[in-house]
Amino acid sequence: MCGIFGIFGHPEAANLAYLGLHALQHRGQESGGIVSVDGGRLHSHRAMGHIADVFDTRTLAGLPGTAAIGHVRYSTAGTSDVRNAQPFAVEYVAGVIAVAHNGNLVNAVELRARLEAAGAIFQTNADTEVIVHLVAHAREADPVARIIAALRQVEGAYSVLFVTGDKLIAVRDPHGFRPLALGKLHDGWAFASETCAFDLVEAAFVREVAPGEMIVVDSEGLHSSRPFDLPGVPPESFCVFEHVYFARPDSRVNGQSVYRVRERLGRRLAEEHPIDADVVIPVPDSGIAAAIGYARASGIPYDMGMIRSHYVGRTFIEPQQSIRHFGVKLKLNAVREVLDGKRVVVIDDSIVRGTTSRKIVTLLRGAGAREVHVRISSPPTLFPCFFGIDTPTRSELIAASHTVEEIKRYLSCDSLGYLSQEGLMAAVEAGPKGAQRFCDACFTGSYPVRIESHQGNLVRLGATTGGRA
Ligand code: AMP
């Protein structure tokens, strides 16, 4: 769970990268960084924290040049380390190179062991560093040929940006797990995980980088090639969870508006799990678009039954006396005027461990809700993700070990309904792109890249770029 942004051919490259990363902040809040290129030299600044805290006018002034790449990294407790902050920038035998990666390599452990046996010294525990070493170890003279040789050895999810002394290179893995879009900005070019970043910097969306495509940008323009096409492998496995939860609703990913997809998920949910109720409310912000869809399809009025605080920081002072449900109350508060005496349908995008939903049900009842009906705009989350979404192990996924009825009892709601797998696919495929292949392994367990199983536990997981899995 990371966001990447790149820009080539603009006098304010680092400032625009800063803005682009700001728009991608939802994809990672642990650390941020930008590497700029000026006269063949790299300049780098990376730190822990949100983009607005990582950079100020002084640090941005230290990033001269007309090309830059940037990264925001997802936060997970205990694994925060500025050494893992990206982009990684190195000098090696063929020059300078920096890399910013969104995704998760599934064979990073084997590759790292092989590289270490050959003498490589790793400075981080991120899988992305494997890519840097593979580039450095490649036999080819040309940096672009080295990148191709390196990425041909990695498996899994990678939407990745590189800068060298005179080029910006964008690559999407052959499955296209994670998004990556190309934009035009005056005489320059931009790349971003999501199009919402283009809106902020006023770049025009040109198209998505295709699965398996490499785009090299240099002073002569764009050069597209497909060095990573895999024979016999289903070409496209875009992450359906980007549509369900992860991407921002004002973005277009995989050819369609995230907002429209979520609204359709909500409409379909209303058809599959209707209920007599007085009000439809979202869990803000993740449930908003689906709740609007549910309300429209069901005819039940939509209202904001909870308000989210946008100022919840990473650290807060725990009260001395224990306050029940403190964590969720810090983030969400109920609006009694909307809920009191009402039969409430509450919409969220997913249930992972079940702890949030359980607290939300208690919160709504505490504000007077007479009935609470939980509706989830995706199927039960049954399997962990190995391709860049931070999910806990199977044993922590409540739906992996409990029936819907058991989960309903745990949440202590009056009814619970999940969208079906068919409903999910119908909603995403009702868009302009029509029928297509997605990675839906978190719901089905059908992983597009083989993940080896050992005694019932899925192994073969590299250190992630995006936190624990
Ligand atoms: P839980 O308490 O574990 O059931 O959390 C469920 C909530 O987490 C839902 O409101 C989702 O919007 C949100 N969510 C779903 N997937 C993720 C994820 N990979 N990382 C962080 N939050 C998530």
Image (tube, rainbow, N blue to C red):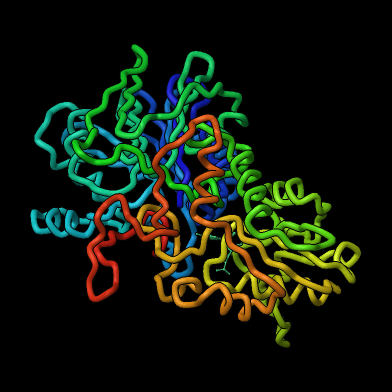
Report the image quarter containing ligand 1: bottom right
Observer-nearest residue: 419 or 369? 419
Which image quadrant: the C terminus?
bottom left
> x, y (%) of residue 123?
27, 56
On the question of residue 100 being in view, the answer is no
Q: Quadrant of residue 248?
A: top right
In the drawing, does residue 102 fall left or right of residue 293? left
Q: Is residue 318 above or below residue 216?
A: below
Q: Is residue 168 above or below residue 128?
A: above
Observer-nearest residue: 6 or 397? 397
Residue at 84% of width from left, 61% of height from top? 278
> x, y (%) of residue 41?
33, 30
Residue at 83% of width from left, 71% of height from top? 369
Q: Quadrant of residue 310?
A: bottom right
> x, y (%) of residue 323?
73, 83
In the drawing, does residue 138 fall left or right of residue 426? left
On the question of residue 29 being in view, the answer is yes
Residue at 12% of width from left, 56% of height from top? 114
In the drawing, does residue 371 fall left or right of residue 192? right
Observer-nearest residue: 304 or 372? 372
**Count of numbered tags:** 0
Observer-nearest residue: 88 or 306? 306
Q: Quadrant of residue 196?
A: top right
In the drawing, does residue 231 fall left or right of residue 360? left
> x, y (%) of residue 348?
64, 59
